[in-house]
Image (cartoon, helix red, strand yellow):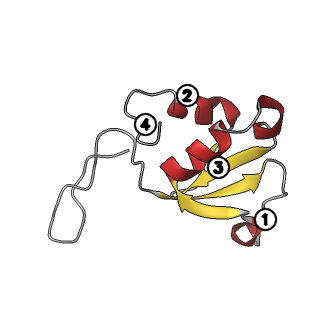
Amino acid sequence: MTDHPSTYSADDTFREGVQWDDRASLHIAHDGQGIFDSMKGLRRGSLAELVAQVASMPEEERRKYVIQKAGDHKLGNAEIMALASRDDFPLK
């Protein structure tokens, strides 16, 4: 991430830490992506909500899913579980 100011009011847009309230969507891990990828989302919500949902699944089940976060970042099982185990995770 960069720490440059935005073009709107020249405010600093960089925020430290995990943005738990960022928009995200739950997808089957190998759903093919492509131009219709956003329509393939199974559920939408905040990053925290979707991390909590996947983390509550049995291990074999959660490996079937990924979370796509706003900004085109895809979180796999290892990253989801690392977020769920953080001390600052809001939905423990």
Q: Which residue is mark 1?
A: 34
In the rendered structure, find residue 82 and report the number of the disc placed on it. 2
**Which of the two labelled residues, at mark 1 and mark 3, occupies the earlier sequence position?**
1
Q: Is residue 57 above or below residue 50?
A: above
Asked if disc 1 and disc 2 are in contact, CB closer than 8 Å, the reply is no
**Which of the two labelled residues, at mark 1 and mark 2, occupies the earlier sequence position?**
1
* Residue drawn at point x = 51 percent, y = 33 percent: 83
From mark 4 to mark 1, how far is it between C-alphas? 31 Å
What element does badge 3 sit on? strand
Mark 1 crowdedness (10 Å alpha carbons): few <14, some 14-19, many ≥20: few
In the rendered structure, find residue 67 and report the number of the disc placed on it. 3
Which amino acid, mark 4?
Answer: Phe
Q: Nearer the viewer, mark 4 or mark 3?
A: 4
**Which of the two labelled residues, at mark 4 and mark 1, occupies the earlier sequence position?**
1
**Which of the two labelled residues, at mark 3 and mark 2, occupies the earlier sequence position?**
3
* Residue drawn at point x = 53 percent, y = 33 percent: 84
From mark 2 to mark 4, how far is it between C-alphas? 10 Å
Q: Left or right: 91 with respect to 73?
A: left
- Front-lying residue, 30 or 45: 45
Which amino acid, mark 3?
Answer: Ile
From mark 1 to mark 3, how far is it between C-alphas? 16 Å
Q: Is residue 75 above or below residue 78?
A: below
Quarter where residue 18 is shown: top left
What element does badge 1 sit on? loop
Q: Which residue is mark 4?
A: 89
Q: Left or right: 79 with respect to 85?
A: right
